[in-house]
Image: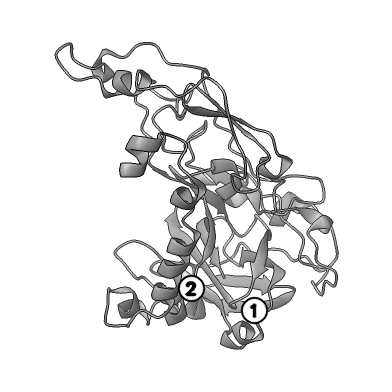
Amino acid sequence: SEVTITGGHPLPDEYWHVTDYYKNIIEKTRNLDPSVGSCHDMRNDIPERVCSIALKGRTEYTPRANPDETSLTSIIKPTPDGYIPKNEDELLYDGEDVRNPALEIPEDAIDVHAILLNRRKLENLKVVEDVSTAEEVHFNNGYMGKIENRSFARPESTMLRGPTNGIVSRTLEESIVPGNGWEVNGVPPGNCDGTYSAICGRSKKSDCLLYGHMDNRGGIIGNAYSGWLVMNLKDLKEGIIIIKIETWHKPEESLRTNGWTEVNNGQRYLEGYGTTDDTHRRLEGLPDTLFFDFAIDGKVTSWNKDEFEENRRIPQRVPEVWTLLDDSEMAKKGESKDVELAIRMRGCARDCSFQVTHVYWA
């Protein structure tokens, strides 16, 4: 633009703040006519309100921005002995990779990166006042080098675990205790944020360490021996909780419960935790003795196999989703609260190996 050409960088405050622009987009989305787009065509699969509100979400799929903060493991409540599922697959090595000729720019090609590095430089040190809430911003060789203001520091995680999650009054049943049998499955090691320089993959099991491919569909896997998977959901306001589960995984994928014959391998944290009956017969698909329990702030709902399948929605070819909460009255109150979501399977031993891949709420 003309301002960029004549004024250089950094641009004046009014040219690089887009709050009003974003607010305009949000307002238009909220009032979008149902005939526009295809979101409302899925009204039988997900609450139609989803089309006009912003959802929060966590997943183990990669690549994704800020992997540590956007993972399912970031909202999982630890067991009484402190266990939280983590990725056991480790990087074989860290740091920069060896030179890969396939990624080098041909000799006769234009090197855009080199052009950008040698662009017109501003003065070595320039102090700019009144940039948002920063006290001063130092620009060195055209780059934002340092922001000396504590408000720009990385905030502490808002996904606090355990009893410090800000819930003042809890009505959870004593039997809802995080289980020890859940684990991370199918997630590559490293920082898989989708950027060019990200260090991702390089697993000890890999036969091509320079592959660099980040597209993986991992999740938190467990079965009827795994116990409760308990998650802390912050700022629930619209009364919507949706969960995506893959129900087709094989028992041998759940390594943590290998050899177990009862919930939590016999550990008993509190009375009333329950056991799992091994004597069941498998119908086509899921075992007919399956029970799926979910609890929202201690209120437990149990579905048998038929009810579980009746509540399943398949909005596209592969995804299976369940709406666990759709309370429009909560949205009318205009108040947000932190809730505790817990799920478990019963009555199917290791034969119902489910992998939780996404949790959405608003």
Left or right? Give the position of 264 relative to 188.
right
Can you give x and y, in whole percent of width and height, for residue 138 in the image?
59, 29
**Which of the two residues, 322 or 353, is positioned nearer the viewer here?**
322
Q: Residue at x 66, y 85 (%)?
A: 333
Residue found at the far front of this picture: 6
* Residue 329, numbered circle: none
Q: Which residue is mark 2?
A: 53
In the picture, the quarter occupied by the C terminus is bottom right
Quick one: 245 or 100, which is closer to the camera? 100
What's the residue type where badge 1 is placed? Thr
Judged left or right of residue 291, residue 148 is: right
Report helix, strand or loop for mark 1: strand
Q: Position of residue 339 (x, y in %)?
A: 70, 69
Observer able to see residue 268:
no
Q: Position of residue 99 (x, y in %)?
A: 35, 11
Count how many numbered circles sit on residues in the image: 2
Could you tell me which quadrant the N terminus lies in? top left
Q: Residue at x 85, y 72 (%)?
A: 169
Tell me the mark number nearer the camera, choosing from 2 and 1: 2
Location of residue 280 by image quarter: bottom right
Instruction: Identify the residue shown where x is 41% and y is 38%.
Output: 194
**Amino acid at the residue labelled 2:** Ile
Q: CA distance from mark 2 to mark 1?
A: 26 Å
Report x, y in % for residue 229. Answer: 66, 58
Near-viewer residue (284 or 314): 314
Q: Which mark is residue 301?
A: 1
Display coloring: one colour
Asked if residue 287 can be seen in this view, the reply is yes
Q: Nearer the viewer, residue 352 or 214?
A: 214
Neighbor class of circle 2 (other Cα within 10 Å; few <14, some 14-19, many 20+) is some
